[in-house]
Amino acid sequence: MEFLYFDAGLGAMLVQALVAAVAGIALFYKSITHKIKTIFGLNKNTSDSEVFDDINIDDSTIENASQDDK
């Protein structure tokens, strides 16, 4: 009877393949559920203004910082 030899490289490759498969399945599931929710109108509508409301950058602050670098 012969035994298989698993070295560290093969073990790491198997773990990487397993992690990639799980990530692929999760992203596929998320994509499918998003498409189904969109078809039935169950998604909450978000506009770009809602997403970026919490970012407050003053243009003068950026200009002052770039002048300080000179």
Image (cartoon, rainbow, N blue to C red):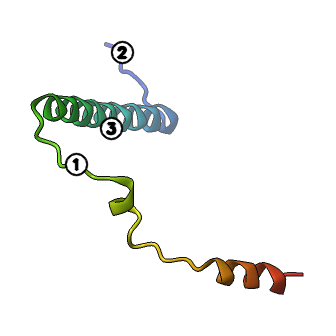
> What residue lies at 35% left-to-right and 38% top-to-bottom?
19
Q: Nearer the viewer, residue 15 or 45?
A: 45
Q: Which mark is residue 35?
A: none
> What residue lies at 48% left-to-right and 34% top-to-bottom?
7
Callout 3 secondary element? helix
Q: Measuring from the top left, give residue 27's x and y in whole percent.
A: 30, 36
Q: Is residue 54 above or below residue 17?
A: below
Q: Which mark is residue 2?
A: 2
First reached walking from the N terminus: tag 3 or tag 2: 2
Callout 2 secondary element? loop
Q: Measuring from the top left, give residue 57's x and y in whole percent.
A: 55, 77
First reached walking from the N terminus: tag 1 or tag 3: 3
Q: Quadrant of residue 69?
A: bottom right
Count neighbours of disc 1 (C-alpha within 10 A) and say few if under 14, some if 14 to 19, many if 20 or more.
few
On the rendered structure, is 39 left or right of 68? Answer: left
Q: Nearer the viewer, mark 1 or mark 3?
A: 1
On the rendered structure, is 37 left or right of 62? Answer: left
Q: Which residue is mark 1?
A: 45
Q: Nearer the viewer, mark 3 or mark 2?
A: 3
Q: Is residue 55 above or below residue 48?
A: below
Q: Which residue is mark 3?
A: 23
On the rendered structure, is 27 left or right of 29? Answer: right
Q: Measuring from the top left, give residue 45's x and y in whole percent.
A: 22, 48
